[in-house]
Amino acid sequence: MADINQWQLPRNEADKLLGWRSDGKGMENKDWVSPADLDGKQDHSVNLDELAAVDPGTAGKSILALQLASDVRDYLDVPTQVATRTELKALNTTKDTVAYLRESNRQGLFKWTTGDYSTQIAADAQEGVYVKADAIASSAGAWVRSYKDELDPLWFGAAGDGTTDDSTAITGAIALGVDINGFGRTYKVSSATSDFTVIKNAAFKVGSITHISRDFLRADTAKITDGLLYTAWTEDKCYLVGDQIRVWVNEKESHPDGTGRIVLYFSDDNGASFSHGEYLDLAASGRTLWCAGFTGSTEYLIVRVPSGSTDVPPYTYERWSRTITFGAGTGEFNGAWTVTAITFPTPSGFTGQPVMVISFTAGHSNSIVVGTSYGEGAAVARSTDGGATWTSFIIGTDTDLEEPTVKYDSSTQRYYGFCRNGGSGNPVYWHSGVDDLSSISRYTAPVGTFGASAMTDSPVPFQIRNGRVHAFSSYRNGTLEGAASDELTSAYYMDMPLHVGNIWTQSTTKIYRLGTIPHREGAAGSSACGVGSVVIVDDKVHLFYGMEERTGTTSGLNRIANIYQTVIFLADRNGMFDFRNDLVANRSAGPLRRMVGGKSGFLSYTSDASGDYPGILSGRPNFALRNSAVTIAGGVLTLSGLGRYGHYLVDTEAAAATDDLDTITDADAKMGDVIILSTSTSGRDVVVKNGTGNILCGGADKTLSTARDRIVLQFTNFGGTAAWSMLDFGDNS
């Protein structure tokens, strides 16, 4: 108990302090003595009193603090932080082997690494990764940045703001041969690298052109036609009908070619796949299509008609129009066209009809507006009566100013557009006054906008979306980054602000070089290469344009072009698939169906839901049979409007026992068409008359008396005389 009691605390006493006993055994109350009662003795150095009265000032405190930090680090084994590379180079590498660099945009952890780094330090002149210590040779060691896999151009001194010259920094980063991640920034440089192998998510701005890595813009390119013909000129005549994308093209060998046809391709799955081509007219007549559009209820085509059978001036024009309806069970996208000849007014100083009518927009006050191109300049024409009559407004009278595109923006109540060939050879941007086409302002892209060479002869199709202009254009004279070339040519996507004024000088104008497209026509130039359209669906900008795959001097397989589609994605949402910003890859085998049970043929339906048999594609012709009989009326068999079948059943008028067939009328008949006729039922004789009407039966009438009898006829039209000539007759009674 004594050992325990001796540690008990004494009772409190006034003016005493509790402390340890001198023998260390327990605690006791001790007297407290003030410094004033020490009889001149001091308990600390007088120097401390003197220092306490001194104010070292701001500078002195800073020096004392630094010295203190230095003193502390002499005894503490912790990494240092340096504000600049100069401080990093001055560190004592026997003490400091890890340092964090805090220099703006160059932040990162560096480790002192022994070894011969003379080659790396020489290559890394911008000190992005390798930094030489002041007191140590580069062959003995270096400060090396800790990073994983990719370099950031900012480490090498780049700004990445699109306006500061980052040429030296980018050159320095590329010199290391390590993958570079641009992190979505734009770097202004004097020239773009020709090889993006080690670069991702970066854009390099040279002048006004932005050269991009593949992943800088989310994009997808595909071929939407795959033919052995010259399918081209999809110039600003693609648009939406509801959710359907419509792409019109001309299929021919060249401008003066008389075998050209107008073809429609469409997509009902958001642009993931496209239909087989549909001819506007199977007959080759020299007609071509350069202008088409949709107002929300009416579809319009402006068809150019040559003076002869080939596509050469002087031209006249036709308006093709039809009503489009929507609704479950009532929608009609493919009704009959109404065709009307139209005449455009001749603007003051111009002559004749326009050489080309391109582009289409629904304008103010329920009007439609198209672009008109003359040899003397460019204009737009506006109609308030659905295209029956027009009023012209001149954009410019320059002889090289051609092919104006036009779109109306209801929010600003102005018309906007582009023309090819401005004063510098580059495209021209134009806009109207408020709902006033008589007041038009023009702005030519400055020299060098698209490279050393002017981007001449290039129309600029576009669409307006949320106050931005999304446009497409390309060289069509074989120009690759300003250097003449017979094959490769550069294409561009432009994202620009909708601007009343000079759009080319706006800070948010972005001109992206998409890459190269084939241009096979040589130095003479190609009017088909790159000529395109722009359609915006949900958050996807679709660019449609032609690529020349092969060309030559003769017709047929010697000249091939197809239509391509590049999609620029404006947004990216979460999830595996969202149709608003995704495309489904088309992996289907097409509309053909194989025959069953070991058969080698394929089937192709010629009419939907008609109950007729499909055509069999199996190495031998198969003529689809129209099951419903066609009746003779007054000696005439009318096939128009019944669909194009290979085999028709013929019935006599009023079910007579016998009836003469003198004439066959078919507005859809084409040169070379072959048809088979048979009587609809035995006991009703159909007498095909020779030479009475437009049927030739080899010099004698032929009677179809049983259901097994057949007569085969071919349609010809020589010198304007149409006839159905017999190829064969089978009397199988």
Image (cartoon, helix red, strand yellow):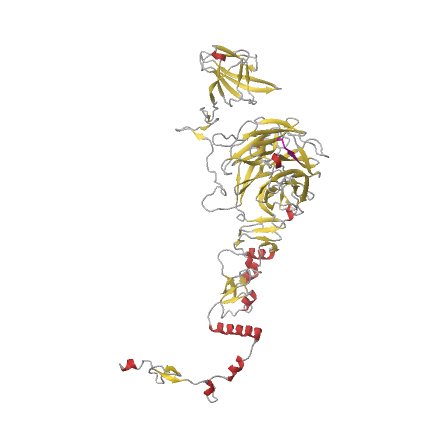
Relative horizontal placement of residue 398, taking residue 218 as reference (left or right): right
Q: Pick out the residue farthest to the left.
A: 1
Q: Give coordinates of residue 674: x percent, y percent.
A: 52, 21
> Residue at coordinates 49% horizontally, 70% vertically from top-left?
95
Any part of residue 681 in sight: yes
Give the prevailing secondary structure in the magenta stretch.
Answer: strand
User: In the depicted view, which residue is nearer to us: 108 or 148?
Assistant: 108
Q: Give coordinates of residue 645: x percent, y percent.
A: 50, 22
Q: Give coordinates of residue 248: x percent, y percent.
A: 57, 34
Magenta residue span: 380-385
Any part of residue 284 in sight: no
Quarter of the picture holding the C terminus: top left
Query: Considering only vertical position in the picture, is 305 above or below 430?
Result: above
User: In the depicted view, which residue is nearer to us: 521 or 179?
Assistant: 179
Query: Considering only vertical position in the picture, is 86 above or below 384?
Result: below
Picture quadrant where residue 634 is located: top right
Relative horizontal placement of residue 636, taking residue 391 as reference (left or right): left
Does 340 lie within the magenta span? no
